[in-house]
Amino acid sequence: MGKSDYREESGLADRVLDPNKLIGRYQIASLLRPALFLILACSMVSPGFAADAEPAEYSGKGADTCLKCHDEDNEYPVLPVFRTGHGERNDSRSPMAILQCETCHGPAGNHTEKVKQGEIRAPIRAFGSGAWTPVTEQNAICLKCHNDTNRINWHGGIHETESVACADCHQTHARRDPMLTARNQVEKCNQCHLKQKAEFYRRSSHPLRFDKMRCSDCHNAHGSFGDKLIRTATKNELCNQCHAEKRGPVLWPHAPVLEDCTLCHNSHGSVNNALLNKRPPFLCQQCHNNAGHPSPLYSGDGLPGGSVPSQRKFLLARSCLNCHSQVHGSNHPSGVKLLR
Ligand code: HEC
Ligand code: HEC
Ligand code: HEC
Ligand code: HEC
Ligand code: HEC
Ligand code: HEC
Ligand code: HEC
Ligand code: HEC
Ligand code: HEC
Ligand code: HEC
């Protein structure tokens, strides 16, 4: 939806807002009122808009009207919005160049009027999944301007179907959106994803808690073509973006490595070395029960002081990897058993 669409919807089509002035001096011409009413009535039945919301009208008042009450002394300081792309009055794509605060917060009606004692202030659209405005209506507002390739899979994505609001992750009235810095993003995602938060505190993990990586290195929170909101079509494609040396092709590949790195690794973190799901030999024995050499049930008996010393090489140090060191595949002419 472009700027002119907003003007039409708001009934302010013929009024040009001087982008250099904060003061929105335009009043809704009484002639336009019937047209405005029709358009608003239509927008109420279009999907994404609450059918039961009061058909408030755009006040057409600029930001300065709002700022009379919502200033920096307020419980919720709104001014930082002017230090973001959303407050850029000289950028015709910006909400501030269109209906200013009402572009996002919607028709204010007489929310901006003084109220007498005992009277209730007219409601105005609020954001976040705790707000009274339905999440689908809120998100539709943001998507009017941000319906681009990065959000092509928003509809049907898990965050959309779980009714997560754009504003649950993004903060508009902040100088820097938390999603765009590593530390703040990870913190925010972790507020809802406690299990994953714990995984990143394990002994071996991708270095998110040191601000070296962020969730969005691997996930597209807006939805994806892949499973689990993964940025790429397959998991291996993702891992290989940063671990290119594992991509191959090699002379003697190890089948599970070609198939899916997460057969052996936990992408977030693990209590074992190298993000491994299980410790060798147990990791390997999930798939190799009857290897060409004895593969008994390993126990404490195989440890130093135990009764089966021959098992030590299978249990100590790197276990199966003591011999099969090339677990990701081998390029050695005689590396078929991944020994070198
Ligand atoms: C005359 C003072 C006044 C003006 C002008 C005013 N507001 Fe408010 N606004 C309030 C008060 C007071 C509240 C607190 C909620 C309440 O008590 O209704 C509020 C609440 C809000 C909320 C939170 C609503 C909610 O349900 O959580 C938003 C958003 C908001 N105002 C936006 C605006 C915008 C945008 C404008 C300009 C178009 C504006 N306000 C103009 C006084 C004002
Ligand atoms: C009227 C159009 C419009 C609407 C509505 C709108 N935005 Fe934006 N948004 C923009 C523009 C323009 C920019 C600046 C883009 C640029 O600088 O390239 C922007 C930038 C952003 C950014 C990047 C911030 C940064 O610092 O780079 C985020 C995140 C964002 N918007 C989220 C939202 C969310 C969430 C909503 C709904 C609450 C929303 N937008 C509503 C036009 C809009
Ligand atoms: C679950 C958290 C989450 C939700 C919900 C979310 N975003 Fe984002 N958004 C992010 C993260 C993380 C980034 C930064 C990394 C990236 O671009 O993927 C981002 C980046 C952005 C950007 C700036 C970069 C760009 O793509 O232009 C815009 C604009 C944006 N989001 C808009 C939206 C809109 C609109 C919605 C709602 C339909 C939304 N986001 C919902 C997490 C979220
Ligand atoms: C790009 C869309 C956008 C624009 C433009 C915008 N807001 Fe907001 N506003 C939001 C979102 C989203 C929230 C929810 C909290 C957050 O993201 O920071 C919010 C929160 C608020 C709140 C607090 C509501 C509450 O629940 O307590 C007030 C008050 C408010 N805005 C007023 C304004 C005023 C005044 C302006 C104009 C100067 C304005 N907003 C411009 C999107 C916008
Ligand atoms: C407001 C809460 C909230 C926030 C914030 C949030 N999510 Fe989610 N997310 C959910 C819910 C609810 C689900 C669905 C239930 C589940 O799988 O836990 C979900 C699911 C997911 C899934 C699983 C997808 C699947 O198909 O199983 C991934 C991946 C994900 N979120 C990543 C992120 C990332 C990355 C961020 C931060 C950029 C983030 N989330 C922020 C609520 C949130
Ligand atoms: C190194 C890449 C990577 C990073 C960084 C990453 N993830 Fe994941 N995430 C994955 C992969 C791959 C899966 C799929 C795991 C699977 O299928 O075994 C996944 C799965 C998930 C799931 C689905 C449930 C589950 O655990 O399988 C959620 C939720 C999730 N991630 C959230 C997050 C959050 C939140 C962050 C940031 C704190 C994050 N991820 C960072 C790669 C990553
Ligand atoms: C955005 C880049 C990136 C992506 C994508 C990525 N990784 Fe990593 N990975 C890293 C970084 C950085 C480290 C930490 C290296 C260090 O500590 O020296 C790491 C470490 C590891 C380690 C542990 C290394 C060690 O010696 O302990 C394993 C195993 C690993 N990644 C597997 C994966 C798997 C599996 C995937 C796909 C699900 C994946 N990585 C995706 C960047 C990435
Ligand atoms: C059959 C199980 C298995 C599969 C599948 C697997 N790995 Fe590993 N990976 C291991 C083991 C075991 C180690 C520990 C090696 C060691 O201790 O020397 C390891 C270590 C690593 C390391 C850190 C040490 C190093 O060699 O750089 C990275 C990074 C890694 N794997 C990435 C990947 C990637 C990327 C994939 C998918 C392309 C993958 N792994 C698939 C078993 C596997
Ligand atoms: C997810 C299942 C899986 C896991 C886990 C796994 N492998 Fe394999 N491995 C295979 C498959 C499948 C083959 C190919 C078998 C074939 O070609 O007959 C293979 C082949 C091998 C071969 C070559 C066998 C031959 O006959 O050429 C060796 C050696 C091997 N794996 C060792 C290991 C070791 C050591 C581990 C633990 C670090 C391990 N594997 C973990 C599935 C697995
Ligand atoms: C002491 C060194 C050593 C250790 C430790 C070891 N292997 Fe082997 N493994 C070998 C050798 C040597 C071969 C090649 C035998 C041959 O070619 O006949 C082999 C062959 C294999 C094969 C191919 C079987 C076949 O029929 O050719 C598999 C699978 C295998 N090992 C898995 C494992 C697993 C799983 C572990 C850990 C439980 C392990 N190995 C520990 C030395 C070892």
Image (cartoon, grey):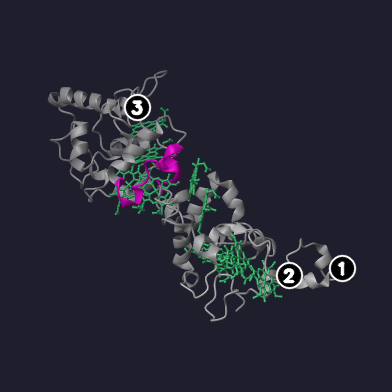
- Rounded to the nearest angstrom, the CA distance separating label 2 from label 1 is 14 Å
Q: Is mark 2 within 8 Å of ligand 10?
A: yes
Picture quadrant of residue 219? bottom left
User: Residue 314 — which label?
Assistant: 2
Residue picked out by circle 1: 307
Q: Which residues are magenta?
A: 146-174
Q: Residue at x 50, y 70 (%)?
A: 246
Mark 1 Cα shell of 10 Å, populated few (<14), some (14-19), many (≥20): few
Residue picked out by circle 3: 50
Is 154 included in the stretch rendered in magenta?
yes
Query: Is 77 on the left-hand or right-hand side of 68?
Result: right
Q: Residue at x 41, y 19 (%)?
A: 117
Amino acid type at image mark 3: Ala
Which badge, 3 or 1, is on the more N-terminal residue?
A: 3
Return the x and y of residue 272 as percentages of the image width and height: 66, 62
Return the x and y of residue 283 as percentages of the image width and height: 65, 61
The residue closer to the viewer here, 16 or 48, is: 48
